Image (spheres, rainbow, N blue to C red):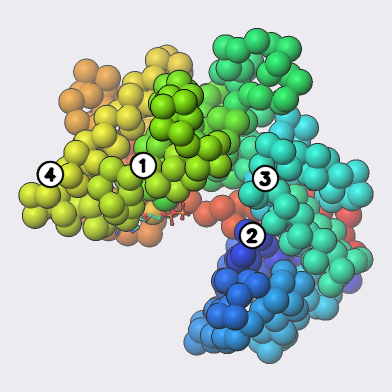
Amino acid sequence: MSSPTRVLVLNSGSSSVKYQLLDMRDSSRLAVGLVERIGEQTSRLKHTPAGGESRECGGAIADHDAALKAVAEELAKDGLGLDSPELAAIGHRVVHGGKTFTEPTVIDGAVLAEIERLIPVAPLHNPANLTGIRTAQVLRPDLPQVAVFDTAFHTTMPESAARYAIDVKTADEHRVRRYGFHGTSHAYVSRATAELLGKDPAETNVIVLHLGNGASASAVRGGRCVDTSMGLTPLEGLVMGTRSGDMDPAVIFHLMRVGGMSADEIDTLLNKKSGLIGLCGDNDMREIRRRVDEGDEQAELAFDIYIHRLKKYIGAYYAVLGRVDAVAFTAGVGENAAPVRAAALAGLEELGLAVDGERNAVRGDEARLISPDGARVAVAVVPTDEELEIATQTYALVIGSGNHT
Ligand code: ADP
């Protein structure tokens, strides 16, 4: 029999499961969907088969087990059931792989135990990811399940970038170091950018700016990450939708001692009530731009702070790389917000960086250049595709190793 060609990608959050079923012969989507508000009375499953109408079902979906069973039923209605011999593997997005997981990994008992051991450094994400894996294992115990880690691409960072300058013994005892996140996206986009330039990724240096609601930058030298802006957790680095990004860590002691706030309160403040939403009450860049265009000063200041931080990281990673072939913008803001791209690179002509106004204004789903012809450094918009990258890595591992059923 010919090898199975389908991969199911699962991204399990604490109260949601996003999924895509891909056919790896042509990387096409056979179905995509989302289960939201798991554990509430108002859960919702939205399922869209390729070329078909979306279907929605509401009602209470008690847990991940029920969610995945509901997904399996929807897939079966389209003749794409999880019992199909065409299914080669399930690829799981796992947020934290620590220092251990540098590559996508076929999941066994030891791998599950290690993902569990990493819960203290990813208390929100890894438990949800583990639940998704265990549920999928029950549904198809015979099928290879692969973990693709958000941190893996960043494990090539040198110690000089990965370590915080704090007491080494304390840091090691508590596994405090910079891990970085969004790695699947940074890997995909840096490679796609090299391809857009017609260059070998192994010889291309790229600054990737993943600007979604969460946001991170990375410096990629010859296909390997050498620095990234998120750290022990996704809180470090750029100004984000609801996260502060970089600040003096002493702000926390100050808020504890003088503001009387608890660690949990400050955690919520910095992760959920800061960044753009903390600065101006909105975290959606579309709304912020609309307000800026109307002359709203608070929105303008929030935008300026966002851009100032972004520009600092572009400069820093330019220095880290020494030679830059391209700057690539990706994710919701990076792919759609032309004013962000223009402002982030304004005044950097001396570094060979410029944005062509007309090209920047063009909208589209394809990877494209927005720098002027002949620019020393290419500036690109490269739509990210984390699900395709997870499916590609999963399929390569399973089919490449003959590990399929
Ligand atoms: P995440 O995966 O982190 O939730 P996304 O990459 O989907 O985020 O990005 C979501 C963000 O993208 C929104 O919060 C919004 O700020 C921004 N965004 C989406 N579409 C546009 C647009 N057309 N113009 C400007 N910003 C946009």
Q: Amino acid at mark 1?
A: Gly
Q: CA distance from mark 3 to mark 4?
A: 37 Å
CB under 8 Å between discs 3 and 4: no
Q: Which residue is mark 3?
A: 123
Q: Nearer the viewer, residue 279 or 200?
A: 279
Q: Which residue is mark 4?
A: 297
Marked residue nearer the N-terminal end (3 or 4):
3
Crowding at dot 4, Cα within 10 Å, few <14 / some 14-19 / many 20+, comes out as: few
Q: Which mark is residue 275?
A: 1
Q: CA distance from mark 3 to mark 1?
A: 21 Å
Marked residue nearer the N-terminal end (3 or 1):
3
What element does badge 3 sit on?
loop
Q: Is mark 1 within 8 Å of ligand 1?
A: no
Q: Which mark is residue 170?
A: none
Q: Position of residue 397 (x, y in %)?
A: 78, 49
Name the residue at 26% across, 23% down: 352
Marked residue nearer the N-terminal end (1 or 2):
2
Q: Amino acid at mark 4?
A: Glu
Q: Which mark is residue 14?
A: 2
Q: Position of residue 94 (x, y in %)?
A: 69, 49
Name the residue at 71% across, 64% down: 7
| 181 vs 323: above or below | below
Marked residue nearer the N-terminal end (4 or 2):
2
Q: Quadrant of residue 118?
A: top right
